[in-house]
Amino acid sequence: MRWVSLAALAALPLLGSAQTKSVNDSYGEMMLVPGGAFRMGDNFGDGLPRERPVHTVEVDTFYMAKLEVTNAQWRKFRDDPGYDDAKLWPSGRPLPKDQIPYWTQANNHGGGTADSDDYPVLGVNWDGAVAYCNWVSGKTGKKYRLPTEAEWEKAARGTDQRRYPWGNSIDHSYANYVGSAPFDTGMKVGLYDGSKRGELQTHSGASPYGILDMAGNVMEWCSDWYSKDYYAASPRKNPKGPASGAYRAIRGGSFFVEALDVRTYGRQAGWPELQAWRMLGFRVARDQ
């Protein structure tokens, strides 16, 4: 029998969950994330105070998009007459279509350039992300929304407190973070799905529930207001963040940050009206 050291075992990717149930309302595949308790926060001690204390959270069952929202999906919204419906927008003011940065930039695979459909939409602010969710809700009759921070973390790491969606170690074969390409920008959604692509991608970057790109590629808006001290006061059941604030929570890191910043429990925040972040996109959640 061949013996393997504990150190070697710790470096191996963790096995994902067998749970692969999904639905598709014609607006992208949604993966089931079962409800229940998990330990949320920095259990490795390599993060920041805003990622602690580790605390137990319970979330209800929900669906999370398998992929980040793409240029093709955003374009359907952008070109739909409903885009200008003020009721879809939290501010009541539709974002002018020509104010989304990077849309016409080929080096960033902007949605207004050729062969860009499968790349993540870049630079959409929080209001735009919420408006898109509201639009899809109206089209499907289902409740689409941005995930809470707690839901996002559960979907990314499951219940075993792993550092990354796939396990506890990382290199550029798992995810798109700084240095993955000659020019740091968004890659096609779902690229890191376990299919070997040349010498780059040899491992699956999926979470325990089969969700992709939850580390790197683009940062993702959450529904919560942000507070660096929220974990100390978070309720156990379905936490939704502070009642108010100046910034909204962001998760997942991006193509422009180091490996430390794409951890499943890493927390960031952004001004919700900001329309200039090349690293920022979003994915949607759906009630069961």
Image (spheres, helix red, strand yellow):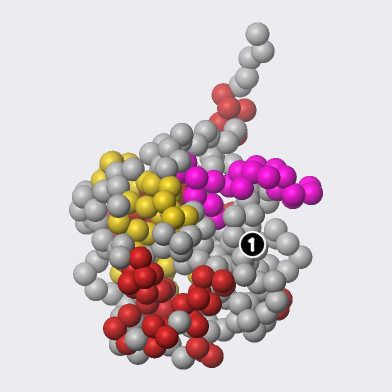
Image height check: is 158 above or below 102? above
Q: Nearer the viewer, residue 74 or 58?
A: 74
Local crowd size for mark 1, using a 10 Å CA cut-off: few (<14), some (14–19), many (≥20): some
Is 261 located above or below residue 14 in the figure? below
**Front in this rendered view, residue 257 or 153:** 153
Residue 134: give x, y in percent of width and height: 34, 73
Q: What residue is shown at x 38% (from left), y 59% (from top)?
A: 285
- Lateral position of residue 21 relative to residue 6, left or right: left
Give percent across and percent down for residue 3.
63, 14
Q: Is residue 271 visible?
A: no
Locate residue 90: give its quadrant.
Answer: bottom left
Secondary element at image label 1:
loop
- Over which residues does the magenta segment extend? 193-213
- The residue that mark 1 highlights is 188
Q: Residue 201 in magenta? A: yes
For image coordinates 65% across by 72% down, the residue present is 116
Kind of residue indicated by mark 1 = Lys
92 relative position to 190: left or right = left
